[in-house]
Image (cartoon, coloured by chain):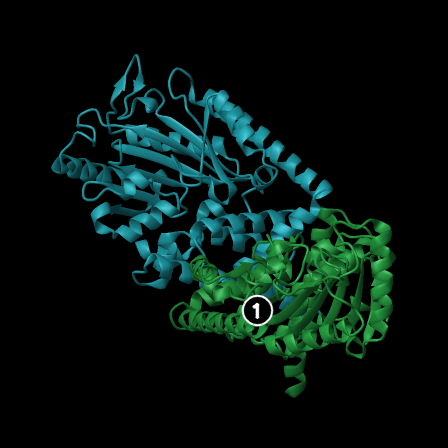
Chain colours: A cyan, B green
C-alpha cells in the first residue's frame, strides 16, 4: 500500500460505529530500546540508520504486524509525516525526524511501530472506543514477537530502560481520548482536570503533550510507569475514564433537561457557521465540530451522520487541508480551503437525508 | 391613531428606499423654553403639568404638525415610552419622565415635539437618508408656527436660552446616522472618529450620548450651538458626512477588490448565525445585521431585501422584542424570543426569492 492512499480513508480510530459518544479512542504504547545500540538521542545518523535497517528487516518476520507500510522518514515528505501525525499514527517528535527513523504500520492502523523516535522502538496499539485491554493484548503480543530475536535494554531493578526517565519500568503509556463538550459547556472541565491530576493521571489536548483541548477533545493517560504491573495501571486508567464518561453523560442529561435551548443554540450556530463561513481557522473548526457532534448525540440535529463530523475532525487539520489542495498553501489560503471543504461536505451531508425523505414520499 | 399601532409599522427613518447605503437618517432638533415658566428641572410637577397642558392645546393650532399622536407620558406604559425611544422619536431622558411630560407626533414620524424633557420644548425633524436641509426647513417652520403665540426664553446676547449651556444660542443639534461597517472591518474607525472630533463634531453610537456603536451605526452631530448661523453649522456637518460617505465607499471598494473572501465570510457567518441561533443578545444581533446589510450592499447576498434587515435593526431592540411577545420577559427569555423572531423573518426573506425564481421557471 502506498503512503498516499492512506489519507483518502477515514482514520481507523475515528470509526463512528465502534467509538462511543464520549470515548473516542484508546491507545497503549510501549517504549523499548535495543541493548546493543546507543539510544537515538546519543547515536550518530549512521548508527540510527543501521538500527532502522535492522529493525525494518525484523518486522517482516512478525506476522502480527501484517505490515502494510514500512517506510523510512526520508522516503516521505514533511507533509506526509505531518499527515501521519494528525492521524495519531506517529508522534510530533517522530514526524520531525529524517533519515534513520521510520515507521511500520498495519493496514487497519491499529498496530504500528515508530523506530528511532526518542527510543529505538515505540510500539503502539490504537483502537476506537474504550478498548484498553484489547490494545494492551495486541501491543504485548507484538512486543513478545519482537523480543524473540531482539535483546531489549532491561534492568532487573528498573525494568525496561528508556531515553526519558518518566518511561522507565513498564515503558507503557496508555491513553484514552474523550470528547467532553457538555462538561466544557457547563464550565466544569477545570475542576475535573484538577481531580484527575490529583490521582496521578495526566490530561492533555487532542495532539498530546502541551496542546490545548481544541474541539473539547481530551487525552487522559497514566503518569506512573514504574513499580506497578501494566494491568494495574490500565485498570486504574479505565476506572477514571468510566467515571469521566459518567460525568459527561450526567452533564449532557442536565443540559437536555435544564438548558435545552443552549444546546439548540450551540448546534444551530455550529451548523450556521460551518455551513456558510469562507474563512475557517483549524481551532474554530474543531470547536464548532465538537458542538455539532454534541448536537447530533443529543438529538438536536437528526439529519447528519456523526461519521461525517468525525471524519471532518481529522480533515480540518492543517496538513490534511494542505494535502487535499494538492499544492502548498499559505495560512490564509488554508483557512479558505478549509472553509470551502467543510461547507461542501456539510451541505452534502444535510442534503442526503432530505433526498432520502423525498424519495420516500 | 393609537400608540399601539405605531409599533407594527417600520420606522419612518429606516425607509429602505430613501435611505442611502451609508447614510441612514438625518435629524435636526431645536431646544426651546417658555419665557414665563421655570425650566423643567426647576419646576415642580404641577408647574410642569400646566406647561404640558398649555403646549398640548397650542399644538392643535399648528397645521404643520398634523398631530397624529399627542400623549402625556403618564398615559403610556414604561414599555411604550421605551419603544418610542428605540424608534428615535423621544430621547432616553424623555422616556424616563412621567406626569407633566408629553409628546406630539406627526403620522409620518418626520416631525415631533417632546415637552418637558430637559427643556420645555424639543422640536425634532427626522428623515431617512442625508436630508439635513429639509429637516432644518421643516423644524424651522414648526418653530416659527409655535412662536406665533408663545414667547420663548431668548437673550439678545446669547440667543435661545436652554437648560444645558451646551445648547444655548441656536439651540440646534443636527445629527446624521451613518452605517460604517467597512471602515470598522478595516479597523479604520478610531482614526476616523479622532479626525471628526478634532474639527469640533461629536461621534456617538446608535442610541446617542454615551452609547457604543453597536451594529457599526454612528451618529455624527455638531458640538457648537453658539455664535454661528444654523445654515453654517449644517453645511459644516454635511460636508463632513459627505467625506465620511466617501471614506466608507472607498473602504467598501478596497474590501471588494482585495478582501472579497473576508466580505463573503462575514456575510455567510451572519446569515448562518442569525438563521440558526436560539439565543441572541441585542448587541450581537445588531453587529450581525450590520454585516448582513454590508453583504447585501456589496452584492454578496442577493436574495434578501435590505428593508428586511433595516426593519430588523429596529425589532431586535429589547423593548420591541418585549412588545412583540405581548408579555413581560426576563433577559434570558428576551434573547430567546429575539433569536426566534430573527430566524423566522430571515427564513421568510430567504424563502421569498426562491419561490419567485421557481414560479419564473
Which residue lies most toward the top here?
A157
Q: Crowding at label 1, few (<14), some or many (≥20) Cα neighbours within 10 Å? A: many
Q: Nearer the viewer, residue B88 or B42?
A: B42
Which chain is home to disc 1?
B
- Residue B352: give x, y in percent of width and height: 68, 76
Residue bearing mark 1: B293
Which residue lies most toward the bottom here?
B360
Q: In which quadrant is the C terminus of chain A drawn?
A: bottom right
Count of marks overlaid on the render: 1
Q: Nearer the viewer, residue A302 or B155?
A: B155
- Residue A197: give x, y in percent of width and height: 48, 24
Q: Secondary structure at mark 1?
A: helix
Q: Residue at x 34, y 58 (%)?
A: A323
- Residue B39: give x, y in percent of width and height: 75, 54
- Choose top left, top right, bottom left or bottom right for residue A95: top left
Would residue B14 be visible to someone looking at this image?
Answer: yes
Q: Residue at x 28, y 25 (%)?
A: A162
| Drawn side of residue A6 relative to residue B348, left or right | left
| Drawn side of residue A300 relative to residue A63, left or right | right
Would residue A348 be visible to someone looking at this image?
Answer: no
Above or below — where is A107 with respect to A157? below
Above or below — where is B328 with respect to B72? above
Q: Nearer the viewer, residue A99 or B356?
A: B356
Above or below — where is A350 with respect to B42? below
Q: In which quadrant is the N terminus of chain A drawn?
A: bottom left
- Residue A239: give x, y in percent of width and height: 55, 25
| Drawn side of residue A18 relative to residue B334, left or right | left
Q: Residue at x 55, y 29 (%)?
A: A192
Amino acid at each position: 500500500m502506498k503512503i498516499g492512499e492512506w489519507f483518502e480513508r477515514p482514520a481507523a480510530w475515528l470509526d463512528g460505529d465502534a467509538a462511543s459518544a464520549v470515548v473516542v479512542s484508546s491507545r497503549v504504547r510501549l517504549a523499548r530500546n535495543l541493548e546493543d545500540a546507543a539510544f537515538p538521542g546519543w547515536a550518530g545518523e549512521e548508527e540510527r540508520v543501521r538500527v532502522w535497517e535492522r529493525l525494518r528487516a525484523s518486522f517482516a518476520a512478525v506476522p502480527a504486524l501484517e505490515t502494510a507500510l514500512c517506510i523510512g522518514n526520508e522516503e516521505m515528505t514533511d507533509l506526509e509525516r505531518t499527515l501521519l501525525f494528525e492521524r495519531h499514527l506517529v508522534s510530533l517528535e517522530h514526524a520531525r525526524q529524517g533519515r534513520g527513523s521510520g515507521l511500520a504500520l498495519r493496514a487497519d492502523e491499529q498496530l504500528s511501530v515508530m523506530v528511532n523516535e526518542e527510543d529505538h522502538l515505540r510500539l503502539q496499539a490504537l483502537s476506537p472506543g474504550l478498548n484498553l485491554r484489547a490494545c494492551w493484548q495486541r501491543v504485548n503480543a507484538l512486543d513478545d514477537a519482537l523480543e524473540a530475536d531482539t535483546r531489549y535494554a532491561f534492568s532487573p531493578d528498573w525494568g525496561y530502560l528508556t531515553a526519558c526517565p518518566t518511561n522507565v519500568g513498564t515503558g507503557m503509556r496508555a491513553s484514552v481520548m474523550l470528547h467532553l463538550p457538555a462538561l466544557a459547556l457547563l464550565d466544569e472541565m477545570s475542576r475535573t482536570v484538577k481531580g484527575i491530576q490529583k490521582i496521578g493521571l495526566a490530561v492533555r489536548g487532542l495532539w498530546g503533550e502541551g496542546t490545548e483541548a481544541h474541539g473539547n477533545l481530551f487525552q487522559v493517560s497514566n503518569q506512573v510507569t514504574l513499580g506497578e504491573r501494566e494491568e494495574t495501571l490500565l485498570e486504574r486508567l479505565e476506572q477514571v475514564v468510566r467515571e469521566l464518561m459518567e460525568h459527561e453523560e450526567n452533564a449532557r442529561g442536565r443540559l437536555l433537561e435544564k438548558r435545552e435551548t443552549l444546546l439548540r443554540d450551540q448546534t444551530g450556530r455550529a451548523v450556521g457557521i460551518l455551513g456558510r463561513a469562507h474563512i475557517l481557522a483549524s481551532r474554530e473548526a474543531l470547536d464548532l465540530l465538537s458542538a455539532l457532534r454534541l448536537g447530533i448525540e443529543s438529538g438536536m440535529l437528526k439529519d447528519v451522520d456523526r461519521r461525517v463530523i468525525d471524519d471532518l475532525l481529522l480533515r480540518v487539520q492543517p496538513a490534511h487541508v494542505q494535502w487535499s489542495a494538492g499544492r502548498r498553501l499559505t495560512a490564509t489560503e488554508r483557512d479558505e480551503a478549509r472553509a470551502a471543504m467543510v461547507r461542501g461536505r456539510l451541505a452534502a451531508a444535510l442534503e442526503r437525508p432530505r433526498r432520502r425523505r423525498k424519495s420516500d414520499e
